[in-house]
């Protein structure tokens, strides 16, 4: 397993400074602490975190620290806020770090169309699933295949500008938001989809983090591609600026639609001294959420895109969609989700098969035990085929079962 990158970036230094101020009490902040422990029971294959062939995050049937989060918002003045999300995990190459750190400018203006600017490191708000604090899901312990990948390989390091209008302010039923963003980094986005495939879990990559995958011979051998069996998701390789465009449309508080187009504009023939390539990755994302009744909410997301590495060394198209529902019981929430995903291998590199296809079902039951504690139970079945698994076993097929029992403390 590769050693974690321990060099301190400007973002890491800023996060350390902000956390020091919070701990010393020099700034007033709206701060939330979340701790989540999970008892995990699952199939015995080694996880991708340990460079195994499993799509699971954890290996052992034991208690794991799946989330430890400190999320804070500082009101700097009437127009500016500073947001920071600090994470700790019991797994991965980097176990403590920052996942988001950005400034938000929302000036008080009389006009009904309001401007907003974000600067720093953050997620584009393309998900209607990950709407809880720190980009967690309020419905599941594990994210959909789409948003598991977003949490692993995509983060904006740049600026986003938007205009929005609240329908209630103009006595209309419809609200809208239009936005555009520019960023650097994310040059390796697409690596995991191609060489590991989609996975379903809740770990968000930290800045300066590394994500491992199975050391496929064609990738790691000196006389072949000679690349590492890991990726650093937010590495800048070619110094090109990527962009994304988005739009939100909401009807009262009942329905919402979000569309995003993302293009990292990476130069696929660029490679850095660690033999990490830039991957030209672009996609469309469409998310829908509808409150069918006071108890039942339906939500869904579809993703379609492509990624290119080298001079047609890897050329893949990828697709994924999920359908989910959440039902409020008397004192609990029952949620279910169906996922489908597909990576299509369109290049002529026969030694590097990237095709994968699968589907997953997830069931979750969550019940508050007190104002601070929540009990959750989740079962998941993820099965499909992945062509490069024949390098580690005789069959392309996989069927992965997992069951989790979690206690979440939120303070």
Image (cartoon, grey):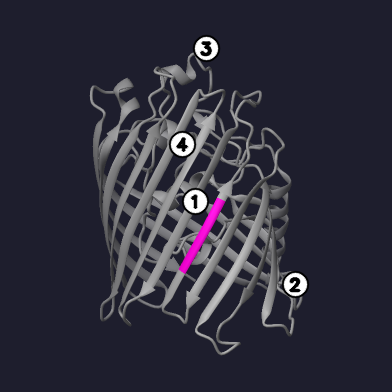
* Label 1 – label 3 distance at C-alpha: 36 Å
Q: Position of residue 77 (x, y in %)?
A: 76, 76
Q: Secondary structure at mark 4?
A: helix
176 and 195: which is toward the camera: 176
Residue pictured at 67% horizontal, 33% vertical? 237
- Please tell me whether residue 121 is drawn above or below residue 103 in the rendered image: above
**Could you say whether the residue bearing mark 1 is in a helix, strand or loop?**
strand
Query: In the rendered image, which residue does mark 3 sit on?
Result: 222
Which label's residue is closer to the chain start, 2 or 1? Answer: 2
Q: Which residues are magenta?
A: 257-261
- Residue under label 4, please give it: 192
Residue 89 visible within the image: no
Distance (Cα) linking label 2 and label 3: 52 Å
Residue designated by label 1: 284
The picture places residue 62, in percent across and down from the top left corner, at: 31, 47
167 to the left or right of 257:
right
| Tag 1 near tag 3, CB within 8 Å | no
Q: Residue furthest top?
A: 223
Q: Mark number for residue 394? A: none
Mark 1 surroundings: few (<14), some (14-19) or many (≥20) residues within 10 A: some
- Does dot 2 land on a helix, a strand or a loop? loop
Q: How busy is the neighbourhood of tag 2: few (under 14 within 10 Å), some, or many (20 plus)?
A: some
Q: Provide residue 335's location: percent of width, then percent of height.
A: 29, 66
Choose top left, top right, bottom left or bottom right for residue 344: top left
Label 3 secondary element = loop
Q: Earlier in the sequence, mark 2 or mark 3?
A: 2
N-term mark: 3 or 4 = 4
Q: Are marks 4 and 1 in contact (CB under 8 Å)?
A: no
Q: Earlier in the sequence, mark 2 or mark 4?
A: 2
| Numbered mark located on residue 76 in the image | 2
**Residue 78 in magenta?**
no
């Amino acid at each position: 397993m590769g050693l974690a990158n321990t060099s301190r970036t400007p973002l890491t230094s800023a996060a350390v400074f902000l956390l020091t101020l919070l701990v010393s009490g020099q700034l007033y902040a709206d701060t939330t602490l979340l701790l989540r422990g999970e008892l995990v029971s699952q199939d015995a294959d080694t996880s991708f975190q340990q460079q195994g062939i499993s799509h699971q995050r954890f290996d052992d049937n034991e208690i794991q620290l799946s989330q430890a989060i400190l999320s804070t918002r500082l009101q700097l003045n009437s127009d500016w806020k500073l947001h920071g999300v600090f994470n700790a995990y019991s797994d991965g190459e980097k176990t403590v770090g920052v996942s988001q750190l950005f400034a938000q400018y929302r000036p008080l203006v009389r006009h009904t169309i309001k401007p907003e600017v974000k600067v720093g490191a953050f997620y584009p708000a393309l998900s209607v699933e990950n709407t809880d604090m720190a980009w967690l899901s309020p419905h599941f312990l594990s994210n959909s295949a789409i948003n598991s990948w977003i949490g692993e390989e995509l983060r904006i390091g740049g600026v986003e500008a938007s205009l929005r209008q609240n329908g209630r302010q103009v006595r209309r039923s419809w609200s809208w938001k239009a936005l555009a963003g520019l960023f650097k980094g994310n040059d390796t986005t697409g690596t995991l989809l191609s060489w590991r495939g989609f996975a379903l879990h809740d770990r968000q990559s930290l800045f300066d983090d590394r994500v491992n995958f199975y050391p496929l011979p064609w990738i790691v051998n000196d006389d072949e591609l000679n690349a590492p069996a890991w990726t650093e998701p937010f590495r800048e390789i070619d110094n090109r600026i990527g962009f994304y465009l988005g739009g939100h449309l909401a009807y009262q508080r009942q329905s919402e639609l979000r569309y995003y187009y993302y293009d990292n504009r990476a130069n696929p023939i660029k490679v850095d001294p660690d033999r990490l390539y830039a991957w030209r990755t672009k996609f469309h994302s469409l998310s829908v959420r509808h409150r069918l009744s006071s108890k039942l909410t339906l939500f869904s997301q579809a993703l379609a895109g492509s990624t290119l590495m080298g001079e047609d060394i890897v050329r893949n198209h990828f697709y994924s969609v999920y359908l989910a529902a959440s039902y409020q019981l008397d004192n609990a929430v029952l949620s279910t989700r169906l996922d489908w995903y597909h990576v299509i291998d369109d290049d002529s590199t026969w030694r590097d098969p990237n095709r994968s296809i699968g589907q997953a079902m997830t069931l979750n039951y969550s019940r508050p035990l007190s104002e601070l504690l929540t009990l959750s139970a989740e079962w998941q079945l993820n099965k499909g085929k992945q062509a490069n698994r024949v390098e580690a076993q005789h069959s392309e097929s996989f069927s992965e079962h997992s069951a989790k029992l979690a206690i979440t403390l939120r303070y």
